[in-house]
């Protein structure tokens, strides 16, 4: 495969919608996760509370969808707050 095709495939992957996932842990409190989702992900309080409940009972929850370049700083901010998060 030539370099141009590889670059084009990389660009397409970076532009597709990805999910920002937060995972359950035994460290962070409900209040901290809710506060983090409100401040970092710009969730409304009810949305943040619902996501936190899903994280607790299901083990994970998609908290944001978008392009990689928009999700990366959000993921970094959640990780800096001690939450378990990744972009998938």
Image: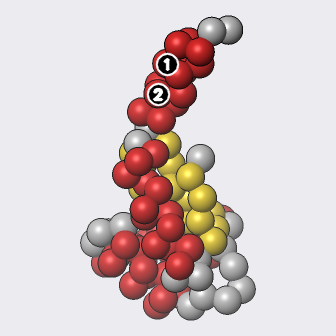
Q: CA distance from mark 2 to mark 1?
A: 5 Å
Q: Residues within 10 Å of mark 1 (few under 14, many from 20)?
A: few
Q: Which mark is residue 63?
A: none
The x, y position of residue 10, in whole percent, is 54, 27
As drawn, the label of residue 11 is: 2
Residue found farthest to the front: 3
**Residue 12 located left or right of residue 70:** right
- Left or right: residue 57 compared with residue 39: right
Choose top left, top right, bottom left or bottom right for residue 59: bottom right
- Give the residue at x 33% y 78%: 39
* Nearer the observer, 50 or 16: 16
Q: Which quarter of the image is occupied by the N terminus?
A: top right
Badge 1 element: helix
Q: Is residue 62 visible?
A: no
**Residue at horizontal 49%, vertical 18%?**
8
Placement of 65 over or under 25, stated as above or below: above
In the displayed orientation, state which residue is furthest to the top.
Answer: 1
Nearest the viewer among 88 and 24 is: 88
- Identify the residue at the far right of this view: 26
- Picture mark count: 2
Above or below — where is 28 with respect to 55?
below
Mark number, residue 8: 1
Q: Quadrant of residue 60?
A: bottom right
Q: Secondary structure at mark 2?
A: helix
Asked if the residue at tag 1 contacts the one at tag 2, i.e. Cβ–Cβ closer than 8 Å, the answer is yes
Nearest the viewer among 24 and 75 is 75
**Is residue 86 shown above or below 17?**
below
């Amino acid at each position: 495969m030539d370099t141009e095709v590889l670059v084009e495939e990389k660009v397409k992957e970076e532009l597709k919608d990805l999910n920002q996932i937060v995972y359950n842990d035994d460290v962070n409190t409900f209040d901290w996760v809710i506060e983090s989702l409100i401040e970092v992900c710009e969730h409304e309080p009810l949305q943040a509370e619902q996501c936190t409940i899903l994280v607790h009972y299901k083990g994970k929850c998609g908290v944001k969808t978008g392009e990689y370049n928009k999700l990366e700083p959000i993921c970094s901010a959640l990780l800096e707050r001690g939450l378990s998060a990744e972009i998938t």
